[in-house]
Amino acid sequence: MKQIQKLYAALFLTALSVSSEGFVFAAEAAKPKPASAKATVKLHPLTPVPLQKVTVDDKFWTPKLVQWRKTTINDVFDKFERSGAFENFDRVARKEKGGHKGDPWYDGLVYETITGTSDFLANNPDPVLQARVEGFIARIAAAAAADPDGYVNTGAQLNNIGIKWMKPPAANDDRNDNFPHTIYNAGCLVEAGTHFYKATGNIELLKVATRVANYMSSIMGPAPKYNYVPGHAVSEQTFVELYRLYRDEPGLKAKVGLPVNEKDYLDLAEFWIEMRGHTDGRKGEGIYNQDDKSVFEQPTLVGHSVRAGLLATGIATAVVDNKDQRYLETSKRWWDNMVEGKMYITGGLGAIPSSEGFGPDYELPNVGYAETCAAVSGGLFSHKLNLATADARYVDVLEKELYNGALSGISLRGTEYFYTNYLSSGPDHRRWEWLPNTPCCPPMFLKLNGALPSYIYATDANSAYVNLYIGSKANLEVGKTPVTLTQSSNYPWDGTIKLTVSPQKATRFPLNLRIPGWAKGATVDINGKREKSLNLTNSYAKLDRSWKAGDVVTLNLPMPVVHAKADPRVAANVGRVALERGPLVYCFEDIDNAGSVDSLLVTGNATFKPESRPDLLGGVTVLTGTVQQLGVEGAKPVQATAIPFYANSNREPTKMEVWVADEKSKAVPMTLAREAKASASHCFQGDTVAALNDGLAPNASDDKSVRRMTWWDHKGTQEWAQLTFKAPRRLSSVDVYWWDESRIKEFCRVPQSWKVQYLDGGEWKDVTGASAYGTAMDKFNHVDFQGVETTALRIVAQLQPEWSGGILEWRVK
């Protein structure tokens, strides 16, 4: 295992993969030491170069950042306005009751959008956008002014969703914040106030946030204060940031006109972290909210994936200030477990839909949840650990999220979104314009990417660091010497990066370039001369020399196409392979390939080559190669095309796979049924019509391991399922595997009766000469009929009274 851990590069082929050389990369989670008294630890903190000091000029990122600033931000604000999020604040300001719109965390989502917008404004001032946000801030401030303590939580104030914190707590306050999200909302408010002030100098939202933070600090904390912890983490990080703001700008206290003891904010953040698992005086929130035991005794990331990721982010943020060894050990242990046992190859986090959370290590089904917000939290956690330790490994995961797991959460148009980012999906998995109750992913996405320019460069007392390879210009100071760094490349499509170093005067300092784990054989030239050694330190190439204006560093990161293999403990991917190139994970969509992509067989000798396609998906490099496709009569060679994962589901509805078969038993042969387009009279939103002809054979009529099409919640009705062919087909039999939940006592049963119809001249007709229409469970029900030539076939089912029904698989011949 020690040898494996040294071979860090393969970690970013996939968190749970083997490299092309065949080494397995996975590890059991390190066991935590028992919680002990606080001991300090020596860190190597980095300071990110501020947003105002970095100008991005990049072929890949600039068009996206402009689109998100000009289109996506306004799209999100427009939709929040239409859904009543800002009306909630107006009603509170008028001291009304009832009528709250959306779920109780709506306030927090609004604040997160303001945070992301603030960072975009810091990097690209926009008076019109700033004025729009200031209008929203005025409405928020009016709501806060309606309460004598400055308290604002619209769900609690309008509809009693949650209880106002008081000293002592109200008699009916069990201090369980799982659903009300009151501390989460306040934490997001603090973050928004901090970031908007930093971006614009406007203190109005900061005043609201500071007043709320003061009120919370007066109530929450060690005895004689009261034991509250956040139901949804975020405040742990944001209160540390508020502490740093006032620490670094002491003159700001007079401007806001409020009493400020900034240490209170850091103390409260630490209290929230350290009181997890300690439920004296309050109702515990359990493993779902990381509240089942002390974080210092928790061996792995558990529970709701976004909450866990943001709690980890808070711990990794606070350790820079308190230098508590327990915080660093916990952060590192959780990060190792996240990457080695709980992360998808795309950077996706959280496999279990029912909890939006983590399962056991290596439980990573390709239809797992992988929420966009969780990818954001994984990126932020990794970023904060890099800032605490100056270890470039953590930036590799940040990069993975930026280019894959989080980036897939938004459409190429910038106005449609993904909540879940499956690694295997059917045509029914489409991006949504808005979710009325929990549109949390667009705000989180904006928060991650608004700050993107600040992730590129960092400094310590006497060194400069380049973390991301994004075309840009940064003005920074190394020691007391102003230095300009100018970066240009065609990354992520090409691994050659040119970096021009221009200190104000000739000076010696270490310039540290991140060498990604996936980059085997990286080289560095300085002014055209090859460096003999990269002098790797914490995965940085350390270039320690005297620099003069105009020195040029050329970094070459080889980008071969890698066939990544999953750890064998990931059951879903045994016998499968995924393609990666540079920081990008690739996927296959039916629209680019003949037949269904799960019929492809990509063996080890299949060679893929990169091909630039400026006309496709906003301009991408695709991977093309010859593979085998399985059909009824065996395998045949076909040309296959893979696109970057982030660009999936941006065209017509289509099937998509990241992991494709490299063992014949895992490929699903093409059949007549699979060539057809499936549809139905009705399909429950949690199921899919794609299950009708996906070629997956169930083990039983209540087999939940495969997809299903159900007519739920239609009961006792006549329903239909349909296969439509591109051209007329001669058909004479069907096999149907019914979905039935009688054994598990749920809602669907085999139909009361059914029949087969075919389309003839625009009219649906019953087939003739049909054998018995069976409704047996746990088997395919075979029906022969007189042959017909048609472009469409239907199953017409009469559901049992008071019951719904469904189909697991449908075959035709």
Image (cartoon, rainbow, N blue to C red):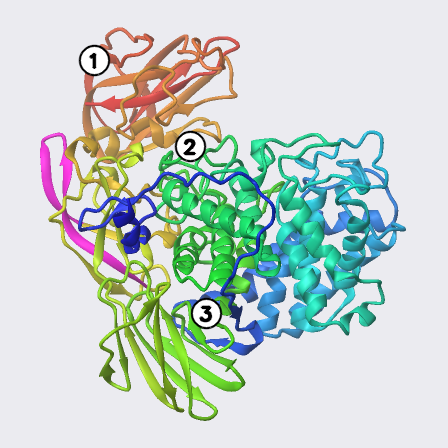
- The residue that label 2 is drawn on is 360
- The residue at which mark 1 appears reads as 784
Residue 398: image location, x then y, percent:
44, 57
Q: Which residue is mark 3?
A: 456
Tag 1: amino acid: Asp
* Label 2 with label 1: CB-CB less than 8 Å: no
Q: Residue at x 37, y 87 (%)?
A: 546
Q: Find numbered disc 1 in the image and state the secondary structure of the residue it sits on.
A: strand
Decide if residue 83 is in sight here. no
User: How packed is label 3: few (under 14 Cα within 10 Å), some, or many (20 or more)?
Assistant: many
Instruction: Residue 305: say if magenta.
Output: no
Query: Type of residue at label 3?
Result: Ile
Dot placed on the residue nearer the N-terminal end, 1 or 3: 3
Q: CA distance from mark 3 to mark 2?
A: 34 Å
Residue range corresponding to the magenta coloring: 620-639
Q: Position of residue 344 (x, y in %)?
A: 37, 44
Residue 694, by quadrant, is top left
